[in-house]
Amino acid sequence: MSRSIYFGPRARRAVNDVLGGSAASVLGITFGLSYALLIFAGPLSPYMSYGIAATFISSAVIATTIALGSSLSFAVAGPDSSTAAVTGILAASLVERIIAADPSAPLLTPVLITLGLSTIVTGMVLCGLGLTRMGRAIRYVPYPVVGGFLGATGLLIVLGAIRVITDHPMKFSSLPQFANIVTISELAAACAMALVLYLTWHRSRGPFGLPIILIGGVIVAHLAFWIIGISPEQARATGSFGPPPPSAFMLPWHADALAHYPWTAMPDLLGNLIAVVFVAAASTLFNTTGIEIAAHREANLERELNVTGFANILAGALAGYAGCISVSRTILNFSSGGRGRLSGLTAAAVSLLMLAIAPELLGYMPKFVLGGLLLYLGADQLHKWIIESRKRLTRTEYASLLVIIVIIVQWGFVPGILIGIIIGCATFAFSAARIEAIKFIFDGSEYRSSLDRSRDDQEVLLAHGGKIQGLNLQSYLFFGSANRLYQHVKALLQEQPECRYLLFDFKLVTGIDSSAAHSFAQIKRSAHDLGVHLVLVHLSASTAKVLRSSDFITDGVTTIDELDHALEWCENEIIMQHQGLAQEAANLRDWFTEILDSEDDADELIRRCQRIEVDTAEIIVRAGDAADSMHFILDGRVGIMVPADDGRITRVRSLGRYTTIGEMGLVSHAPRSATIQAEIASVLYVLNKHQFEAIKADAPELGQKLLTYFVSVMAERLSFANRTIAVLRR
């Protein structure tokens, strides 16, 4: 009883696997016949029997290996439309070069060697990607590049279908050969078959829908020929039917074949060989991902690459061509109830069985029937990547996709991939540059440190908090986004001239490149010119290394670990400066009160003056300039410099704090007779002639006091000069 219960579920699972694998094999047979026609077209048509053998041997070997080793137990594999298309391009390129060199040279053996070598190389690369876990890197290829590549593959399938149907390549030079009623009729019939496939099987995807439609097409074609009065022999004479070739198999790996192989043509075929590898890898990864989503199963991508690589090495050793796991056949098997590895093995067994049956079937099948299937497959892929992808792509990405398709069709896969990657990188750079590097902006009056301060300090920060400007940065900073940051900082410093501390918070920055470091160096120069101190917060080790390598983190730049501590440091600096200014203002008021003998007049004079700071050796006024101002020296020391006879500059007098300079010129309006230069860092208050005239008009009493003070200062200096002259005359 227990044994019957045990074997019952296993038997049911086995039956489901066989049924699912059989349903999937129906698609594999139909597609396999069309792939054989696609690859062995044109000059290779006489060798169709070898193409059929290569197709179904490849199907059997790849299906068996992947069924036994895949992480998805229900996987069904074999040649795919994309891999068949690029393999056909590879074979056609080789044949073209052989015929150009020697029209009488044999074609079959070199083609079989090329198919085998390309498949073996593909398998080795796939295994390498799987073992090194680099297979996922293909997912970093820009989506428009992948779309353009696969869209170009669809277009090549369409062009190959036209060649299968008409025996002529679709070129401008061969267009006159299409201008006959037979060729046009065959193309029309193939287009009709493709349209029927789109209107029926495309929407239902039933397991037996495709073969029923193709058998119906064959019956309709034979009826049409019978009604018109054309016998099968006459139809074969016109090329509408291919001769029923016997299945033939040959291993090309013998010394004589390898010795006569056109190895000199291999560099020219390298691009197409790379295309085969790229398509096989991309199809393996993308098809596996598609199956994961459709079947709600998780696959091991590295294992899939290893198994697919080993399967292709075995197929290549038997002169087969590349293949991979199939989405349509695997999902059909899964939908039919197949869950075990017996499904893939069933599909492999049916492929081997077709080696004896397929040639006879092909002899009664009009070329435009399978050509219509190829047209449908190519058009379906074109629709997916040219029409449907338009909804998912920006205009720039979509334009690059179309450009890649044109480049691949015109110049080959390698230029298309390389130029596509360049376009993708450039598009990404421009797109990323549009992402704001600044998350938000704040100033010290609205965003402060967590330190509790006295009411007086709070009032200082409320009044002068605008001197602190902060920028919270984000994302990766590179040449595009960093240049926009530089332009923004320049505008900020112009709009906020009171800014003295500029904070950059790098907490959300993921990285920075050398070009961005150059932009920060420009920010540093602009800030230094305006007397702004830079503060860097949350600076990572890698970012700090890049900025230090560009000599950005030097004097005038402070690094602090946390934003709160950075704000506290800036606030302390502002409070200290304010306290110093308050003491300075008190000293100035006391001095002016002593001069004018009135606090109100002192306050009025302070209101009329402009405060300036000068560094050591900085020129304040030059000899010969218009005397349009005078200076009150509150702190520091300045020198009066005049040129000597020997060309040197001589200091004739030095003035310290609480002294004035330039009052005589302000009254007489005579040009400056000497240059005034700061000997040490100094603080001066400037009274220009416009304010002096306004004082005389608005506050004549204050103006009179100033004139009196000027006279006393000049009298004192005249007395000093007289005493000096008297000493020199002794």
Image (cartoon, rainbow, N blue to C red):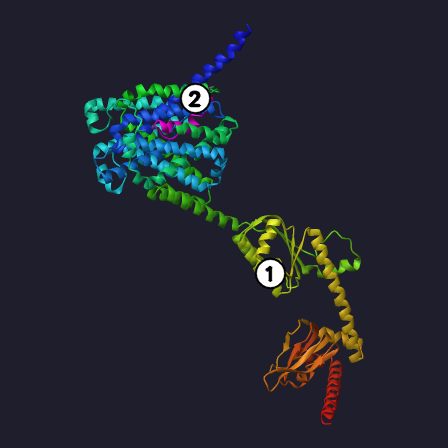
Question: What amino acid type is highlighted by mark number 1?
Answer: Lys
Q: Is residue 444 visible?
A: yes
Q: Residues within 10 Å of mark 2 (few under 14, many from 20)?
A: many
- Most extreme residue toward the top, as rendered? 1
Residue at the image point whose x is 62% and y is 65% from the top: 530
The answer to which of 643 and 393 lies nearer the viewer is 643
> Which disc number belongs to residue 349?
none
Which is nearer the N-term, disc 1 or disc 2? 2
In screen coordinates, is 5 left or right of 416?
A: right
User: Which of the image's four quarters has the N terminus?
Assistant: top right
Q: Helix, strand, or loop for circle 2?
A: helix
The tag on residue 524 is: 1
Tell me, yes or no, whether the two marked residues, 1 and 2, touch with CB atoms within 8 Å: no
Which percent across, then down, holds residue 311? 42, 27
Tag of residue 344: 2
- Magenta-drawn stretch contains 317: yes
The quarter of the displayed image where residue 384 is located: top left
- Residue neighbourhood size for the residue with mark 1, other residues' Cα within 10 Å, grouped as few (<14), some (14–19), many (≥20): many
Residue 442 included in the magenta stretch of the image: no
Identify the image quadrant of the C terminus. Answer: bottom right
Residue 148: image location, x then y, percent: 40, 40
Q: Name the kind of residue labelled 2 in the image.
A: Gly
Q: Residue at x 54, y 54 (%)?
A: 514
Q: Is residue 476 left or right of residue 113?
A: right
| Residue extending farthest front | 255
Position in image of residue 563 (x %, y %): 68, 51
- Res 552 quadrant in image: bottom right
698 w.r.t. 389: above or below: below
Which residues, given as a range, are shown in magenta? 314-336
Residue drawn at (73%, 84%) of the image: 710
